[in-house]
Image (tube, rainbow, N blue to C red):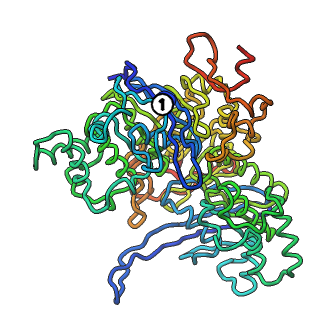
Amino acid sequence: MARQIGEVILEVEDLHTYCFTRFGTVKAVDGVSFNLRQGEALAIVGESGSGKTMTALSLLQLQPRPAARIVKGSIRLEGEDLLQKTEEQMREIRGKRISMILQDPQTSLNPVFTVGNQLIEAIRNHHAGETGRSLVRRAIEGLKQVRVAAPERRVEDYPHQISGGMKQRVVGAIAISCEPKVIIADEPTTSLDVTIQAQYLRLLREIQEETNLALIFITHDFGIVAKMCDRVVVMYAGRHVESGPVRDIFNHPSHPYTQALLRSVPSMDEDVKRLYSIEGQPPALWDLPSGCRFAARCEYAQERCSSEYPPSFTVGLNGSTHSASCWRLREST
Amino acid sequence: MSATPVLQVRGLKKHFPVTKGFLWKKVVGWVQAVDGVDFSIRQGKTLAIVGESGCGKTTTAKLVLCLEQPSAGEVLADGKNVHALAGDALRDYRTTVQAVFQDPWSSLNPRMRVRDIVAEPLVVNRKFPEREIEERVEDAMSRVGLRRQQANLYPHEFSGGQRQRIAVASALVSKPKLIILDEPVSALDVSIRAQIMNLLVDLQQQYDVSYLLIAHHLATTRYMANEVAVMYLGKIVEKAPTRELFGNPLHPYTKALFSAALPSHPDITHEEIILKGEVPSPINPPSGCRFHPRCPFAKAECSVAVPIEKEMAAGHVVACHLYS
């Protein structure tokens, strides 16, 4: 079955998640908006510290509390405002409607329980009333769905008995076991080897085609974006700086940060004489400049850039969904 | 640039024993981490070793650094077997071969000031006067783009990219002939990687130093290396000049690695070769060609006979039954 991109199911608007520490306020997420359609694969790209993981955690309200709080914005899942939900209602949503695959399967599985046990824990939630044998059968089904060989034996294994790629498959099986609408995959393949990564990405694609779920990829790797995603949100220092369909971003990157990032990645497909390198480092999140956050590293920076934060401008024709926050775009439109 | 190799590796093997029992240890098997590897590195050039985890690339690096004793084979520097060196000769060898490791958070001693970290390779050699050490440290730091005032700081006061610069300065300070780069950029952020890669390329030109680059990211090797060796389960399956290898990969494993690499643009689609299963255990590696259980082109003889290396083009060597 082919994927069908349908209705918008998740809308995030102007999300702000701050961490209040004794050293000051860390603006981890400072104005992020995007929406996600059914069957779509959306990439959130950024470096470490750009706020991409905190954005993902905020969607599930799993940000490290009490230090981190969502101070502004809205998150709507199929029209319901998640920020109005109580903790109990959120528990119903996590796993069943939005679930998450974390970066490191080594730490996201519990070492003292068997694989089957951990799968059943998730399934029991969804199939209340079922017990014993039938739950085990469902766990085996789940492992089959993620193409684990000999699932009848694997359910008895502990995480240390299986390989890294297999563990990440188990995490995947747990994530899809309750048939969620949205899966957030936070750097799902960074700890895997290249050929295992290829297997895993293909598996995610197949699962997405079978179930038509919406995927959010959190990544720093434009390769994954190019291979897997339909749309891209580029984040820098807590804000989204550019977003749009994947081909528009690759063909006409419009924010200087996106342009520089794309130029600084060596290519496998052609010889590069010299890599473009972005000098300097991202700003500290507790001491952000008032203007554009990239201004200090930007080769086009003007006076205005360091004093006023640029709004989002549409790139290309009217009605295009490609937009970027850079003052240079105002001059060109 | 001369064509003399700064380092030659011949038939290098490293087998680790697998033991059982506590007091009366019994060897029950061998992990064949590196099993017969040959290569040489020319002055001022870069050889990259690519492969997945467990293929033996880091063990190879450790053997070259004299951190492990080989089970068989030899590593030759200037015609001398480095594992036979001792005392002053070994110390001299260690100043000519340095390393930069993957993770600058764990490879720098948190209790030492940057100045002392950078000076360490000269201090342990015990033959440089203090005055010269000071000059060399200052020179190395400025070459990698660190300021003089930063010499008194501790590693925790630096970001990841800066720390990797410290590690590079420390590797450079003894003016080595060869630097082993073990995944030098994979722990760094995307926007910082290009800075460090460019720095390494520039320094190579300035110092005419050779690199042994260990990496799993193919695009990095394409940018930095002159020659690439692909390793699988302790053996080199294919070796060729970079451009030749990327233009015309021959071994099925190399092809699979290339197809698994992520595209640089959504319109580029690599032919999809998804390998079955995972890398087998190096304790009892498959017979014959070690790749045959996962190889889409495996024939009957692949499980019996070990393929012999064959030169297909100038410098392009492949070990596969498809080409013999």
Q: Can residue B222 be spotted in the picture? A: no
Q: Is residue B7 above or below residue A185?
A: below
Residue at left offset 28%, top offset 60%: A158
Q: Is residue A4 left or right of residue B162?
A: left
Graded by Cα atoms within 10 Å as few (under 14), some (14 to 19) or many (20 or more), the crowding at tag 1 reads some
x%, y% of residue B220?
64, 47
Using residue A60 as the reference point, say whether residue A138 is left or right of it. left
Residue in the picture at 68% in, 77% down? B82
Q: How many marks?
A: 1
For disc 1, the marked residue is A73
- The residue sitting at 37% across, 28% down in the picture is A81
In percent of width and height, residue A59 lies at 41, 37
Residue at (39% x, 50% y) in the render: A165
- Seen in the picture, residue B106 relative to A325 is either above or below; the reply is below
- Give the percent coordinates (x, y) of residue A152: 19, 51
Amino acid bearing label 1:
Gly
Left or right, residue A59 beside residue A181:
right
- A23 or A27: which is nearer to us? A23
Quadrant position of the N terminus of chain B in the picture: bottom right
**Residue B96, x across and y down, in percent:** 76, 72
Q: Is residue A268 visible?
A: yes
In front of the other: A165 or B293: A165
Q: Chain of mark 1?
A: A
**In front here: A2 or B232?**
A2
Per the image, label 1 sits on a secondary structure element best described as: strand
The answer to which image quadrant residue B106 occupies is: bottom right
Q: Residue furthest bottom?
A: B23
